[in-house]
Image (cartoon, helix red, strand yellow):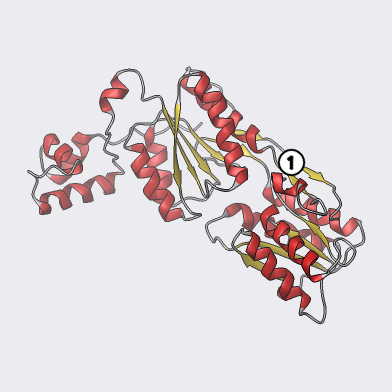
Amino acid sequence: MSKRSRAPAMRDVARLAGVAPMTVSRALSGHPSVRAETRKVVVRAANKLGYVHNFMASALLRRGSKLIALVVPNVSNSVFAETIHGLEEVLSVEGYTLTIGHSGYSKDEEERLVRTLLGYGPDGVVLTGLTHTRATRSLLTRAGVPIVETWNIGSKPIDMAVGFSNFDAAFQATEFLIRRGQKLLAYAGGTQTDNDRTQAREAGFRAAVAKAGLEVREDWVSTMPMELSSGVELARRFAEMNRKPDALFAASDVIASGFILECNRLGVRVPGDIAVTGFDDAPLAEVIEPQLSTVHVPQREIGRLSASLILRRLAGEQHVPTVHDVGFRIVSRASA
């Protein structure tokens, strides 16, 4: 863990804004006694310094807020729900409460949530992915609490990271299809430009196809919301093509399942006409017919390990490893 600078204090904001610390407190709390122009000056100074107004200072003085802040892209996605369960399993035993924000795969919304959640004085923060705005990284670096980035790994996390290589997972999933004889490969991934996980998965797909000496046909590479309806629409589009792929790697089990459902309705045989592999090993993968080959990710373990790292750091442990690779595995089922 790299050494961090001191988090900016209220007195720093007061000095920059040219007002008293009490005025800063009142301005950031929305007190009616503060003039609008003064409030603007204070807010500008606070933003410039990366200061986050602490709504729970009294709680912190009582040895911590017992809150852990979590920001996820989509709380309704079953894979993130599993990670949330893993966090809660470990944190609840130690008396901690999880407070959750939903970013909608937007870095700007994540920044807004982080700024707000830090105002409640959490004892730790858990994020999804490694891609954040510069302001978010600055806020978290100055927060002075344990930070865990999840669902991806890299060499330079803000503090700690728990995840796996999305590139390697996609590469191996694509090689799995190639080894079974598929040569006309299609890819379907998420549209979210702020989603570093799906970006890495597409890169892994392209690298595996290139390594095999095969062609990546751009009309077979699709970006779409991670929804069942996206897979349905993709199956219909492929059905209308003169030259069709013989395999699909989808960066989400949800997309893959929608694709299979529509193939069944259209009379397209899976895997006879087109083999399908997904990603995540969500509960849906074993319910769909035929069952979905996929990349298994230890979703709940990501949450458990993240919580454990935060608790170890809060307990004063000095040498907590920063990057934790939970791995993945290819699960072969009937769809490929």
Taking the spot 63% from the left edge, 39% from the top edge, the residue there is 163
Amino acid type at circle 1 is Phe
Picture coordinates of residue 283 (x, y %)?
70, 44
Give 268 or 221, whichever is nearer the viewer. 268
Q: How many marks?
A: 1
Q: Is residue 112 left or right of residue 44?
A: right
Give 191 or 258, whichever is nearer the viewer. 258
From this viewpoint, which residue is outermost toward the bottom?
242
Badge 1 local density, few (<14 within 10 Å), some, or many (20+)? some
Taking the spot 84% from the left edge, 65% from the top edge, the residue there is 274
Q: Quadrant of residue 26?
A: top left
Which image quadrant: the C terminus?
Answer: bottom right
Taking the spot 47% from the left edge, 50% from the top edge, the residue there is 132
Please give the residue where the numbered disc 1 appears in the rendered image: 328
Q: Is residue 304 visible?
A: yes
Vertical relation: 284 (above or below) 316: below
Q: Quadrant of residue 124?
A: top left
Picture coordinates of residue 72 (x, y %)?
51, 45
Q: Is residue 246 left or right of residue 166?
A: right
Q: Is residue 48 left or right of residue 320?
A: left
Give 82 or 221, whichever is nearer the viewer. 82
- Give the SS element for disc 1: loop
Q: Is residue 252 visible?
A: no
Vertical relation: 251 (above or below) 213: above
Picture coordinates of residue 22 (x, y %)?
12, 35
Picture coordinates of residue 42 (x, y %)?
18, 47
